[in-house]
Amino acid sequence: MDDQSTNIRLPYLIPDQAQKHVTVNESLGILDDLILLTIQSSDLTTPPANPIAGQRYIVADNATADWAGRETQIAVFRDEAWGFHIPDAGWTAWNIENSEMIFFDGSQWAAISTSINSLEQLQSLGIGTQASSSNPFSAKLNNALFAAKDVSDGGSGDMRLALNKETSSNILSLLFQSAWVGKAEIGLAGNDSLAFRTSSDGNSFLDALVMDNSTGIVDFPQGIQSSSINNGPLAGFRNLVINGNFSIAERTLSSIVSNRPAAIDRWYYFGGVCEISRQDLPPGELETFPCSSHFARFDVQTKANWQGFAQRIENVTTLANSTATLSFHIRAQTATQFHVYIFQNFGTNGSPQLTLPPFVSQPVSTSWQKVSFTTTFPSIAGKTIDTNSHIIMVIYANAGSPDQDGYFDIANVQLEPGSAPSPMEYRPPAIEQALCRRYFRKMDVFVPDSQAQLGIINMRSAPTITGGGTGFSPNGTTANSLIASQATGAIQTLSLDAEL
């Protein structure tokens, strides 16, 4: 017969044993130590300085003093001494220090929560908060993550969250609240079409956008304010810069200029002699400029204090008394500085030109970088505005240094209303070309008879005509057509320039 019990090793009484009360009391003490096991801590390596009788601990690794060699054992202080119990796999205890249930797996103690692999048929679950009958699953936290199970872990690498409603007339949605009041909702609200809804009070919701589930057609039941998208009733005119992606080069693809219109339509160059050219973006850079296939390069040939690439934007009233943002990509042959200036010009006999507060000098490297500048255009109240008024936007590539030469590259230039840059606006090439031809165009003409009227041109003003001899003139100040004073005898190429 064994002298102790199998599980918690209580000593047995033996026949004719003297002082039986000693053995019984020892068994009762063990029962008191291990039944309803609650421990003070499982992290201590040395006994507490002033232990209280009956308190129990789990001895941590690398124990010392009276606990040396007792790692993982249950230490109990009673009768002014430490007693120890060796746990078996499966024993459990409540850890007061961490407020969690722990268990012994045969070699170490661990939180029971780490061993739970599944929970089935739960009626409610609250994470960081109390679940309720109306919200049986409730969570109060700052971040949440759903991640796909990797192929290496036996998953597919995909992640799809499925939400289902019983019938079409039910609601399936995500409700967004502020101070516990519903302000927006996305989902299937009483039908199977996806709706984006808003509310001011959490009770009445307006459908802002509805996507028909059978046709895919998008409807805006409350209407749409296109000005919030593109500053006008038509798409494609948020960017006030014409030919900002350098897609049009009707003058020529490359030219050496000084203080005159550049090769690329609508652009000017100020300063010393410079070669202006339109360059093609290589395939590896096209992803950086999704609205462009080209960039402008101006290669300084003769140094000057201020070497600027500029565009004049028609009508000084544009952007008056409002905030606007200029953005573009830039790089240089060698690291240097660049500067941006914007002017309000009130026309030939108008008020004196105003210089907007200049932007501080900016560094430019040999790699493409996007930069943006936000400014407020002054009011034009009290100004005299004459013909040819405009805004001048200048990118000075050497910021006043007379020693700078080499080339500078610029791409995706955009000037738009607002205090932040938006992605480069795309306009179809035919529209961009039509905008450019208000200021410059070329025409191939053949005149069989003198005094013939040629074509409708409708340019900004009566253009200066070059090429084809001297036998052509604009038809009046509106310049809606040309008059030929003599027969050409052959096809002639005319250049018509009505730039600001």
Image (cartoon, rainbow, N blue to C red):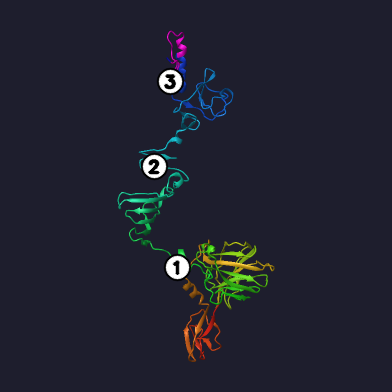
Write the residue at 39% across / 42% down. Answer: 137
Residue at image coords 31%, 51%: 170
User: CA gap, disc 3 to disc 2?
Assistant: 44 Å
At which x and y percent is residue 321? 53, 67
- The spot of residue 138 in percent (x, y) is 41, 42
Left or right, 33 with reference to 470 = left
Label located before the other in sequence (2 or 1): 2
Name the quarter where the C terminus is drawn: bottom right
233 and 304: which one is in front? 304
Q: Circle 1: is it few (<14), some (14-19), or many (20+) Cα within 10 Å?
A: some
Q: Amino acid at mark 3?
A: Thr
> In the depicted view, which residue is nearer to us: 422 or 27?
27
Q: Name the residue type under label 1.
A: Ala
Asked whether residue 144 appears in the rendered view, the answer is no
- Which residue position holds label 2? 137
**Real-space CA distance between mark 2 and mark 1, rounded to the nearest whole angstrom:** 46 Å
In the image, is residue 82 above or below residue 171?
above
Report how far apart the C-alphas of labels 1 and 3 lie in the structure.
85 Å
